[in-house]
């Protein structure tokens, strides 16, 4: 991956190249348009491969910020799987039940199940609270059962009630990196592994998030929380290095954790 940065007074032009893909942008439209003209004059290239095109992103710029959503894509997703008349639920996953392998359950069509999972994965680009539930359901794509299909349909019912939600990026912010982390201790009923969760902010704006099953079994909530705190620390350091290339320098970065034992362990140099 190669990054090119051009600055002129307070304006900036950025072009990032990965193999044969280019992502670019500028604070001035004239710089962006000139870059397009120069590149099309030198190379045979197409402008149809926009991120918003693939993910169905709708970007609305207002005076004090930018609102990103996938309302049209979400509405089409609900209609595509025949959930228009379904009742809306308040959470994407049930709070009293846990999804497991269910080897004795009734099998369902793999193609339909995988199609639903794939459609929901695209929605996690703007509705981050789907990440945990969709990630769990995606683990059973090889052998889906009726209970798994029921769980996926619940997520789509939740999407129906949150179609117009999205992410707000405010112009009134700062350049300080911070993160929030947490863990679902022994949440996987099949192997008792925990799931890490984290979100990363640049100032007050959410820029990245994760929901991932941990590779080892934690024997306590403190251990599970400490592991996710370490993962978030690694991610923050990578983001710090990336921002250095953009000319944005970081000093102290903050990780917020709600487990006192994990905090105490992290403060212990031994």
Image (cartoon, rainbow, N blue to C red):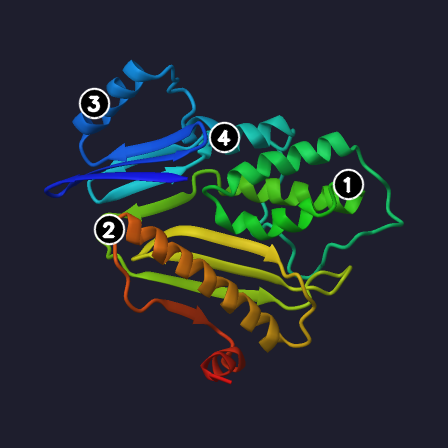
Q: Residues within 10 Å of mark 3 (few under 14, many from 20)?
A: few
Q: Residue at x 84, y 39 (%)?
A: 107
Q: In this view of the protein, which residue sits in the foreground, 49 or 171?
A: 49
The alpha-carbon separation of the residues under discs 4 and 2 comes to 35 Å
Question: Do tag 4 and tag 2 residues touch (Cβ < 8 Å)?
Answer: no
Out of 149 and 232, give the one closest to the viewer.
232
The first of marks 3 and 4 along the sequence is: 3
Which secondary structure lies at badge 3? helix
**40 displayed left or right of 80:** left
- Of residue 65 and residue 248, the one placed in the foreground of this image is 248
Say which residue appears at 65% left-offset and 77% top-offset.
220
Q: Earlier in the sequence, mark 2 or mark 3?
A: 3
Q: Are marks 2 and 1 in contact (CB under 8 Å)?
A: no
Q: Which residue is drawn at 69% across and 64% down?
A: 193
The image's mark for residue 142 is: 1
How many residues crowd around disc 4 within 10 Å: few (fewer than 14), some, or many (20 or more)?
some
Judge the density around disc 1: few (<14), some (14-19), many (≥20) Cα neighbours within 10 Å: few
Q: Mark 2 points at which residue?
A: 247
Label 2's element? loop
> How far is the residue under mark 1 from the one under mark 3?
48 Å
Q: Where is residue 47 in the image (x, y as percent from the top left)?
A: 37, 20
């Amino acid at each position: 991956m190669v990054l090119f940065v051009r600055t002129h007074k307070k304006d900036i032009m950025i072009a990032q190249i990965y193999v044969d893909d280019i992502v670019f942008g500028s604070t001035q439209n004239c710089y962006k348009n000139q870059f397009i003209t120069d590149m099309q004059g030198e190379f045979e290239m197409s402008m149809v491969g926009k991120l918003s095109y693939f993910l169905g992103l709708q970007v609305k710029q207002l005076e004090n910020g930018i609102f990103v959503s996938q309302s049209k894509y979400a509405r089409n997703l609900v209609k595509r799987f025949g959930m228009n008349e379904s009742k809306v639920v308040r959470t994407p996953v049930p709070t009293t039940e846990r999804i497991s392998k269910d080897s004795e359950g009734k099998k369902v069509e793999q193609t339909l199940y995988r199609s639903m999972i794939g459609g929901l994965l695209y929605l996690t680009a703007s509705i981050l609270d789907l990440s945990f539930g969709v990630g769990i359901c995606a683990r059973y794509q090889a052998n889906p059962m009726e209970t798994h299909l029921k769980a996926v349909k619940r997520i789509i019912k939740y999407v129906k009630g949150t179609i117009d939600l999205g992410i707000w990026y405010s112009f009134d912010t700062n350049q300080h990196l911070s993160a929030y982390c947490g863990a679902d201790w022994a949440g996987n009923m099949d192997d008792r592994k925990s799931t890490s969760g984290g979100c990363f902010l640049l100032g007050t704006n959410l820029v990245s998030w994760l929901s991932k099953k941990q590779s080892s079994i934690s024997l306590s909530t403190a251990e599970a929380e400490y592991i996710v705190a370490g993962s978030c620390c690694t991610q923050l350091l990578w983001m710090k290095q990336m921002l250095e290339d953009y000319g944005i320098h970081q000093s102290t970065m903050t990780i917020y954790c709600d487990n006192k034992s994990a905090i105490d362990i992290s403060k212990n140099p031994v």
